[in-house]
Image: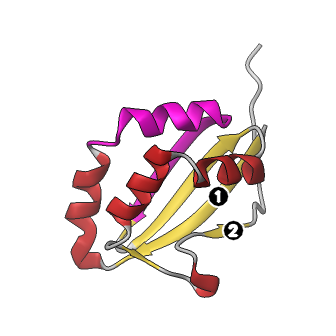
Amino acid sequence: MQRVSFVLQIDESSRDEYIRRHEMVDPELLQAFREVGIRSYSIFLDGGRLFAYMEVEDFEHAMAELSGQPANIRWQQFMSDLLIKHHEDSTLKVIPEVFHFTSAVE
């Protein structure tokens, strides 16, 4: 299982709308996440900066599969007016993991 994190950016004035839209995520999109191997996905908001964390079987494969999923295409279009593009015309920027701690429970 891969742990992947990335940052996204919105204008701070869009904060409430961003939160509101995430209160009504399309169930078809959530099912698509499951089908491509996403096991956990969280987004944290700090001002206009978003930090996302995902546990996924294969990140590159999952993103490639999602790119053609109708529910994901609709969601990306729905969110496109809020997300600010980083370099290379992408709204997300993968960030490296520099520390990880797990406490195994027995």
Q: How far separated are the C-alphas under marks 2 and 1?
A: 6 Å
| Residue wearing tag 1 | 5
Q: Earlier in the sequence, mark 2 or mark 1?
A: 1
Look at the image and tell me in which quarter the N terminus lies. Answer: top right
Dot 1: few (<14), some (14–19), or many (≥20) neighbours within 10 Å? some
* Highlighted range, magenta: 24-45
| Residue wearing tag 2 | 95
Contact flag, marks 2 and 1 (Cβ < 8 Å): yes
Residue furthest toward the top?
A: 106
Under mark 2, the amino acid is Ile
- Please state which of residues 103 and 50 is positioned toward the viewer in this rendering: 50
Under mark 1, the amino acid is Ser
**Residue 14's spot in the image, x, y percent?**
25, 72
Q: Is residue 100 visible?
A: no
Q: Is residue 1 above or below residue 90?
A: above
Q: Secondary structure at mark 2?
A: strand
Q: Is residue 54 visible?
A: yes
**Residue 53's spot in the image, x, y percent?**
59, 51
In this picture, residue 17 sits left or right of residue 9:
left
